[in-house]
Amino acid sequence: MWAKNLLLIAVVVGGFVAVRASLFPLSARARQVNFDPGLAYDPDFQEVLRQIDASFQATWSERAITPAPRADDLTIARRLSLALTGTIPSLEEIRQFENHPPTRRIAGWTNYLLHDRRYADYFAERLARAFVGTEDGPFIAYRKRRYLAWLSDELLKNTPYADIVRQMIAAQGLNVDRPAVNFIAATYDDNKKSPDPEKLAIRVSRAFLGLRIDCAQCHDHFLEPEWKQTDFQALAAFFGRTKQVITNITDVADGEYAFEDRVHGGQRTIAPNVPMLPELLPETGSPRERLAAWVTHPQNVYFARATVNRVWAMMTGRPLLHAIEAQTLEEMSDAAIPSALRILAADFATHGYNLKRLILLIACTEVFQRASAADFDISEEHEQTWAVFPLSRLRPEQVIGSVIQAASVRTINQQSHVFTRLVRYFNERDFVKRYGDIDDDEFARSPGTIPQRLLMMNNPLVNEKAKEDILNASTQIAMFAPSDEAAVETAYLAILTRRPTDAERKYFAAKLAGTHGDPRQRILADLYWTLFNSTEFAFHH
């Protein structure tokens, strides 16, 4: 009996020691994760980075704009963590991050995140909004979770982005054996008993080319004279032979695609064709194989430019262009797009559509590392020219993901206990449903709503993660912090990824002075709740 008691005591003590080591590491280097900067210091990478930075600097010089200073490293780390994983860094990761040489931190941190399953899962969810929408889709015919798992695996392996897109457009087979076909299955129309060619044409043009050609779906495009109704329907015709039987996607050998001519009336047949760059369309292969090859052709500049614009927006909260999708070809022309977009798109195509390289390039730019504020007035021109990092509200899943992570001193990732990950999944899903999802218009600037603020203040989950509980970080900080000042600093790091100002530290340390046990834990819980509901916590900055 005494042996079991000793074992129990040893386990409990060991747990307390481990928690304290995460909060206030005695030897952070002994637990250090290697932040490998990867290709960030290759001469080729550095030259492209120099060109991108120079393009923005030229604009600032031309307009006599003084850019905001560089943000501090912890701000950039938070920025990257939110953009790539959907949560703030854990306290454990912050300790590891700060133990690396400053010259290698940002590139190493980015590369570390890009090799983490959290990145693949989060980016898969974000990209899927453009690829298949936000709805669960037709039951049985469409397997969204299987599709997301496949897309996450491809992103983690760093499969060339062009290969991923080709699979989605051209793949055939069962939606569980070939998950890429769920891109097609997501448009299944129960009335037509087949995928919807028009919906697929819209998604291909918007998601992969960054063009809103669907304005020509029923009539000639009112902004782009080159796009006629027949151009849109000819694009849809590539999917005219695509059929679905229960869970199987296949192409029939022959058959003509017909659409309802809303201009002249009646049904009209049309052959597959592309709305621009017809010389890039292969003559051989199935219709969908030809379309996939055309979309991802190295000379189809719209593909690379649309991808760069979307990824830039996912990382900064705002696209490089004025919108994520262009209404005309002119908006995506060489003369109209920023030179930084041309440079990034060309590098993306040249290096085999390497998505991780693109992300690392963006993370290393001076623009991405600029502060979101300065000691001078920030004008609209500063924002337009990227002389300051744009402020944007956190997405719903980023808000609750950050709350859950801040309540744990340990990193919640694929190595966490399966129960921890399941609880997080269901908590996030429930919170996002209540908070309100922004659906497809995910880059629209939103001021937030009163119900959202009230939800943060009164939601049981948020309160649960702040309250006095031995499993919560607030209680652990109260128990193990060596001083009042250290307790305040640790709470700020865990929630806001920064240290408190002198005024903040003194104010909250005074509240903690002389307290012990339950009263001390309640004060730390109140501090947690206060920081969760701060404006700073709610913004990507």
Image (cartoon, rainbow, N blue to C red):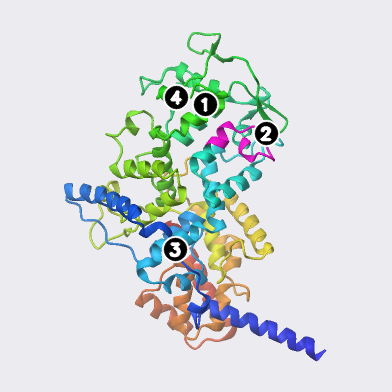
Label number found at residue 109: 3
* C-beta proximity under 8 Å, tags 1 and 2: no
Name the image quarter holding the N terminus: bottom right
* C-beta proximity under 8 Å, tags 4 and 3: no
Indicate the amino acid at tag 3.
Answer: Trp
| Residue at image point 73% right, 84% down | 8
Picture quadrant of residue 503: bottom left
Task: Please tell me which of labels 1 and 3 falls first in the chain.
Answer: 3
Task: Please tell me which of labels 3 and 2 falls first in the chain.
Answer: 3
Position in image of residue 151 (x %, y %): 58, 45
For the residues carrying marks 4 and 1, which lies nearer the camera in this image? Answer: 1
Label number found at residue 290: 1
Residue for badge 4: 215
Query: What SS does tag 1 mark?
Result: helix
Indicate the amino acid at tag 2.
Answer: Gly
Q: Nearer the viewer, residue 407 or 53?
A: 53
